[in-house]
Image (spheres, grey):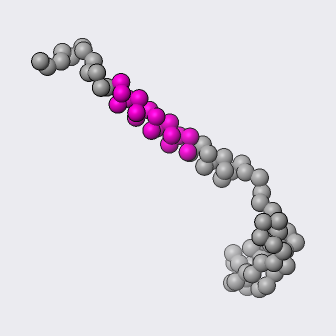
Amino acid sequence: MPYACNEQLPWIPLISTIGFLILLGYFISLIIWFSNTFFRPPKYLRKHYGSWAIVTGCTDGIGRAFARKLAREGLNLIL
């Protein structure tokens, strides 16, 4: 017997709940990514990776700026 227009199918709340939980998971993942990307504390390179760094392509552009940044942080550089 077909359902009338005003009757609710029994599986619709289940499907809606599953969809909501999936969207909630994506939203939480987005919030975590946003906070890790924009609000995390800076990483101290010397503490995590040691006191030396090798920078290739340091004569111009991004490599030069990166080498200067590492030197400002007190790392020993091999250019």
Measured as percent of width and height from the top left, residue 60 is found at 71, 82
Residue 45: x, y in percent? 79, 67
Magenta stretch in the rendered image: 13-29
Q: Is residue 19 magenta?
A: yes
Res. 32 visible in picture: yes
- Tell me the residue at 56%/45% (across/down): 30
User: To which quarter of the image does residue 6 belong?
Assistant: top left
Residue drawn at point x = 50 percent, y = 42 percent: 26
**Residue drawn at 18 percent across, 15 percent down:** 4
**Residue 71 visible in the current orientation:** no
Residue 48 falls in which quadrant of the image? bottom right
Q: Nearer the viewer, residue 34 or 18?
A: 18
Q: How many numbered discs, if any?
A: 0
Q: Is residue 9 left or right of residue 52?
A: left
Helix, strand or loop: magenta stretch:
helix
Q: Is residue 35 magenta?
A: no
